[in-house]
Every structure is written in structure tokens, then in C-alpha cells.
């Protein structure tokens, strides 16, 4: 599956637009507790454990989006947008949502 944040793929021709496809993944509140409990994991202002969880969530969201595109008969996704949002949950907990969307297309 070809994927791009641009609306076209250089050297390829879009022959059919299948529609918008999306994928979401949510990291639960425990990731924030684990993150702050493991603050010693931070090196140079970055947390390897937190980045690993974000990467995993992004991969899940992309896999979900790709599965939707395949179901529509597409072989590429263009115009991909990646968003990160913090969601407040009752009781003061927070969750992080990774959301991706794009347009499923057939290219030749």
C-alpha cells in the first residue's frame, strides 16, 4: 500500500477515488501514570518508553486506515493527515488519541 501526505504520487496516475479512510488508536490513562512513574527513562528531554507507546499507537491507526482502503479496493492512500489529541476522561484521567485520515485511491 503506497501512502503519502501529498495529494498525488509522483510518477503515478490516480485512476479512481474510493473515498476517505481513517484509523484511530487511543492510549489509556495508565500510559500517563507509567510515564510519570518512569520519569527516570528520560534522556536528553525525551522518554524512550513514551515514544515507543506513541509509535505503537500510530502503527495501529495506520494499519486500521490501510485495512479500510484495501476493503474499498484501493492500492494507495493520499493526502494523509496525522493528529494527536489529549482526551479528558471522568475522574481526572487523560487519554491520548492518534488519528489518521486520507483518501483511498487506485493508482497505476
Image (cartoon, helix red, strand yellow):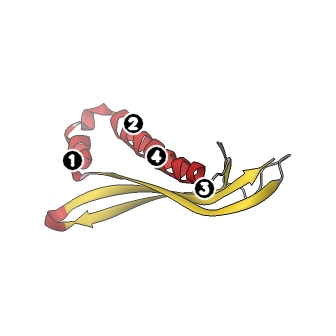
Disc marking residue 58: 4
Of mark 4 and mark 2, the one earlier in the sequence is 2
Relative depth, front residue between 57 and 94 = 57
Of mark 1 and mark 4, the one earlier in the sequence is 1
Q: Nearer the viewer, mark 1 or mark 3?
A: 3
Of mark 1 and mark 2, the one earlier in the sequence is 1
Q: Residue at x 49, y 44 (%)?
A: 63
Disc marking residue 30: 1
Cα distance in 3D space between marks 1 and 3 = 35 Å
Q: Is residue 65 above or below residue 47?
A: below
Q: In the rendered image, which residue does mark 2 sit on?
A: 52
Q: Position of residue 49 (x, y in %)?
A: 34, 35
Disc marking residue 72: 3
Crowding around mark 2 (Cα neighbors within 10 Å: few <14, some 14 to 19, many 20+) is: few
Task: Please indicate whether residue 52 sits to the left or right of residue 9 in the image.
Answer: left
Label 2: element kind: helix
Q: Nearer the viewer, mark 4 or mark 3?
A: 3
Amino acid at each position: 500500500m503506497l501512502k503519502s501526505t501529498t495529494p498525488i504520487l509522483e510518477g503515478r496516475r490516480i485512476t479512481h477515488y474510493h473515498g476517505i479512510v481513517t484509523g484511530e488508536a487511543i492510549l489509556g490513562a495508565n500510559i500517563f501514570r507509567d510515564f510519570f512513574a518512569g520519569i527516570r527513562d528520560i534522556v536528553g528531554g525525551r522518554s524512550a518508553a513514551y515514544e515507543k507507546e506513541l509509535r505503537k499507537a500510530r502503527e495501529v491507526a495506520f494499519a486500521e486506515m490501510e485495512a479500510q482502503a484495501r476493503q474499498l479496493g484501493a492500492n494507495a492512500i493520499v493526502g494523509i493527515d496525522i493528529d494527536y489529541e489529549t482526551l479528558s476522561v471522568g475522574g481526572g484521567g487523560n487519554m491520548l488519541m492518534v488519528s489518521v485520515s486520507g483518501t483511498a485511491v487506485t493508482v497505476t
